[in-house]
Image (cartoon, coloured by chain):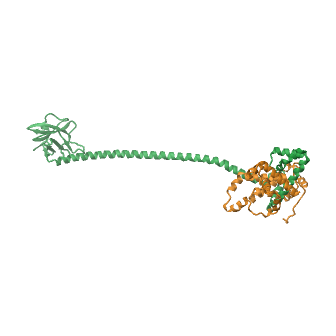
Chain colours: A green, B orange
Amino acid sequence: MEDLKAYIETGILELYVLGDITPDEKRQVEEMASKHPEIKTELDEIELSMEFYAKENAVEPSENLRSRVLGSLLTNLADDNIFTAAPLHNENDSYEEENNIVALPASKKENNFYKYAFAASFALLIASSVALVDVNSKLTDSNSQLVALQADKQHFANQVNLMDKELSVFRDTSYKLIRLKGTPKTPTSLLTVAFSPVQKKVIIDLANMKMPVNDKEHQYQLWALVGGKPVDLGVFDSATDSVTNIKEMKSLASADAFAVTLEPRGGSVNPTMDQMMVIGKF
Amino acid sequence: MSKKQKISLSEDELVLALRNHEKVAVEALYDMYSSSLYGVISRIVIDTAVAEDILQETFVKIWHSFSSYSTEKGRLFTWMVNIARNLAIDKIRSKDFKNQNKNQEIENNVTFIDEQRNTVYKPELMGVKDLVQTLKPDQKSIIDLVYFKGYTHVEAAEELGIPLGTIKTRLRMGIQELRKHFN
């Protein structure tokens, strides 16, 4: 009897009624209540007072809720074997939906991101490659153009140099121009020779030269007559490229006259007199 | 309320009728207990629409699992109020509900906060005032936390900053006061 009182005094029965109790304790209380009528009575009184307390604190739900609740219960009553409660069902639905939304699209999103990122990278790579090839071909074009332009430039520079050289001949007052005229053998032949005793230079004018075309075995040879003796001044061809207008011959300090003979290719030691084409004296 | 005649049965009659799945039992069950159960639910779940959903769920669950109730275990209401309280607490602790609360629209905030702080005047609670006199404030706050807010006595001890033993004593004393008052 004392034990039961002590048990009641622990307050476990109150906690039992309030639902604030572990399943083990719950079983224990129920066992005690079934064994001891005193406990059962005590429990009943606590329950009843809490029931009254709840009634004192009751809140009336809205009028239309009654028919809603009764409707859902009586629907259940009709198909009693399937006890799927409508409102529970609704709530489960929303949970499932929520689960679906959280689980599936999250991974899908991630997949898609990498997919798109890869596609974008790949497209970029292809675009870059195409652009690179294009730019490279353009660069090659530009380079070849540059080479061509440089060659042109070189060409013009050369020409300018030559022109300059030509001009210098005319500027230099020490040059004397001698017109070598055709012999009776070739009366129309003509060659202009510029001679500077100061510079010791002999230059022939190829641009305005009028000489019969020489064959492959023969070349023209320029001679100077110094004190009645012929001096070799070098060989030249009648056909010249367009760039070279003048040709500098071997150097010479003084001369009485100039003459050109047709000699075997490479020139001769002594002039072949019957092959004299043009001659001119000071 | 006078619109419909409320059905009332004795607890034994009600339990028997419920076991037999009688239609009248369902109506009696609702009429006898809906407001008491809703009193508990509406104190835990503030939003009226959600609280009413919980009440509906409670009745469905009572109806559904009635076979697990036996009179030997105690009174019907004790069993039912535990179902109601647990459903309400499950709801406010669910992720779903928490998110919903975070997304309270701004125009609802004034009443929402008022309701949360229990500063709203509820005419249905007027009668409680008399009763409050019979309970000391420290006893009432503990009983209300455990019974109406679903706190465990351990949580209540933390919330109120009172030792566990004191909580238990006050709880018991408070209920003793209620017993004197009601019996």
Q: Residue furthest top?
A: A269
The answer to whether residue A249 is above or below residue B152 is: above
Q: Quadrant of the N terminus of chain A?
A: top right
Q: Residue furthest bottom?
A: B3
Q: Looking at the image, can residue A125 be seen? A: yes
Q: Residue furthest left?
A: A227
Looking at the image, residue B91 sits to the left or right of residue B24; the answer is left
Q: Quadrant of the C terminus of chain A?
A: top left
Q: Looking at the image, can residue B23 be seen? A: no
- The structure residue drawn at horizontal position 72% and vertical position 59%, both measured from the top left corner, is B117
Q: Residue B116 lies in what quarter of the image?
A: bottom right
- Residue B88 x %, y %: 77, 54
- Residue A99 x %, y %: 70, 49
Viewer-proximal residue among A9 and A232? A9
- Residue B41 x %, y %: 78, 56
The answer to whether residue A274 is above or below residue A121 is: above
- The structure residue drawn at horizontal position 10% and vertical position 38%, both measured from the top left corner, is A226
User: How many marks on residues?
Assistant: 0
- Residue A64 x %, y %: 80, 62
